[in-house]
Image (cartoon, rainbow, N blue to C red):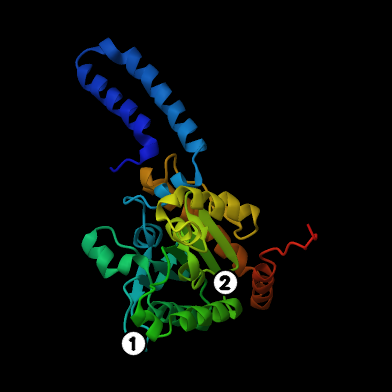
Amino acid sequence: MEHLPHEKQIQEYTKTIEHLKKQSHSTPLFHNEIKRLEQKLELLKRTVYSTLTPWQRVTICRHPARPHAIDYIKNICESFHELHGDRCFRDDPSLIGGVGKIGEMGCVIIGQEKGHDTDSRVQRNFGMLHPEGFRKGLRLLKLAEKFSLPVVTLIDTPGAYPGLEAEERGQAWAIATNLREMASLSTQIIVLIIGEGCSGGALGLGVGDIVAMLEHAYYSVISPEGCASILWRDAAKNVEAAAVLKLTAEDMMRLGIIDTIIPEPLGGAHQDPASIYQRVKQYLLEQMHQLKALPVELLVEQRYLKFRKMGAILADTGQ
């Protein structure tokens, strides 16, 4: 597994322990030393992962082995039937969606998919949706509303695709339409940010009754590199940009943008995917049961008020 820069010392300890274990395979000579090093390694991990900078959190979020939308769908759903196309232009592989069953709850699941290797990343356009991706998502949202099914959206995108052909087909219009329709959709919507949540690409599927984030996901108006290019004319200042953007789950919680932070295994979701799948599944089932108990009219009203109160205007003090 690929190791991140801040994990260098952890990797060195791990290699030392593995070497000693091989040496002591037939003799207990190093058992006490191994036990001592394992205790130090555990303490080191907790120290490193409790003092991460915003940029280090972003690198964890982008780890190649981090579970993607398709992985969550495969591991939390008892059944899933994928649906394709926007009934207007084409199918967008950057968005995977359909009708599924989580536990005993039927639902519509919509996820932004980046791909795992070179071929699949190119096929999925690195998770950057075209307008037809947003329209495909809207078609699934309307399907959920028609059959009174709760909706789960899994957000993981570096942003909507910015190419000329996307603009020609109405990228901004597609995102704006989704914002309007999701705000008034007459069914339950749970939004979960599992990785990158960048710009309108994330917001175009991010309006919901509940908005949750995984611990090492991030949510921002722009990527740190994009922000650095604009503010400092230098993408290499991504570390500084990540700090000023206030993009971590804790920042989002403090600012009232999200409702819940779902803890990840020590070091990130890629370290123990099975445990994060179980946590996410349990969380989604709990939220679906709670939202189902509320009248739809009340849900829509609360959803509107939830997003209406986001943001703060600072009064001019004249200083």
Specify few, some or many for label 2: CA neighbours under 10 Å numbering under 14, 14-19, or 20 or more: many
Which residue: 48% across, 67% down? 202
Q: Is residue 19 above or below residue 52?
A: above
Tell which residue pokes out farthest to the bottom in this image. 88
Q: Is residue 5 above or below residue 101?
A: above
Labels 1 & 2 near each other (Cβ < 8 A): no
Residue located beneath label 2 in the image: 188
The reply, left or right, for residue 128 in relation to residue 250 is left
Q: Amino acid at mark 2?
A: Gln
Specify few, some or many for label 1: CA neighbours under 10 Å numbering under 14, 14-19, or 20 or more: few
Position of residue 228 measured from the top left corner of the image (x, y, whole percent)? 46, 56
Nearer to the camera, 94 or 226: 226
Say which element carries label 2: loop
Which residue: 42% across, 40% down? 267
Q: Is residue 225 visible?
A: yes
Position of residue 284 measured from the top left corner of the image (x, y, whole percent)? 51, 60
Q: Is residue 54 above or below residue 105?
A: above
Say which element carries label 1: loop
**Quarter-wise, where is residue 45 in the image?**
top left
Which residue: 33% across, 79% down? 84
The reply, left or right, for residue 195 in relation to residue 51 is left
Position of residue 62 measured from the top left corner of the image (x, y, whole percent)? 38, 53
Marks 1 and 2, how far apart in space? 28 Å
Residue located beneath label 1 in the image: 89
Position of residue 4 measured from the top left corner of the image (x, y, whole percent)? 35, 41
Q: Is residue 75 above or below residue 108?
A: above
Q: Amino acid at mark 1?
A: Phe
Q: Earlier in the sequence, mark 1 or mark 2?
A: 1
